[in-house]
Image (cartoon, rainbow, N blue to C red):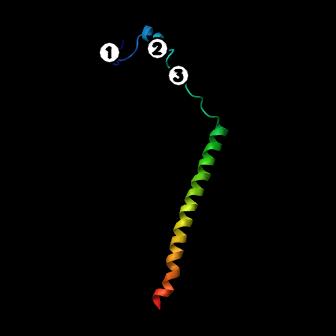
Amino acid sequence: MSKAYPSNLTCAQYEFLSDLIPEPKPILPDSQLLNTLLLDLVFALVIASLLVKLKVLKLAWWLTLLPMLSE
């Protein structure tokens, strides 16, 4: 065991626990990662545009009342 890292495992401890350690998940290929990022971007743009549309509709409703209030 190292003095700097007293929690290091010994070889025997590692061999005992190595079967319990899960295999690392594979990294996405570049094309699949790019497709995922593009899809996320499209969804974000759709949601943002819907939020803007709702705010514009809410604003448009108030703008229709302004001529009536000025009379």
**What percent of the width, then of the height, locates residue 8?**
38, 16
Tag 3 secondary structure: loop
Give the residue number, with chain letter if any, for mark 3: 22
Q: Is residue 2 above or below residue 41?
A: above
- The quarter holding residue 7 reads top left
* Cα gap from disc 3 to disc 1, whole angstroms: 28 Å
In the current view of this chain or complex, which residue is farthest to the top? 12
* Cα gap from disc 1 to disc 2, whole angstroms: 22 Å
Q: Determine whether label 1 and label 2 are within 8 Å by CB.
A: no
**What percent of the width, then of the height, locates residue 42?**
62, 52
Give the residue number, with chain letter if any, for mark 2: 17
Of the numbered discs in the image, which one, if any, rests on residue 3? 1
Residue at figure coordinates x 49%, y 83% from the top left: 66
Tag 2 secondary structure: helix
Residue density around tag 2, few if under 14, some if 14–19, many if 20 or more, within 10 Å: few
Residue placed most toward the observer, 8 or 64: 64
Instruction: Work out which quarter of the rendered image holds the N terminus and state it.
Output: top left
Q: Is residue 30 above or below residue 24?
A: below
Residue at figure coordinates x 51%, y 14% from the top left: 19
The disc, 3 or 1, on the residue closer to the chain's N-terminal end is 1
- The quarter holding residue 46 reads bottom right
Residue placed most toward the observer, 4 or 46: 46
The disc, 2 or 3, on the residue closer to the chain's N-terminal end is 2
Residue at figure coordinates x 54%, y 64% from the top left: 52
The disc, 1 or 2, on the residue closer to the chain's N-terminal end is 1
In the current view of this chain or complex, which residue is farthest to the right? 31
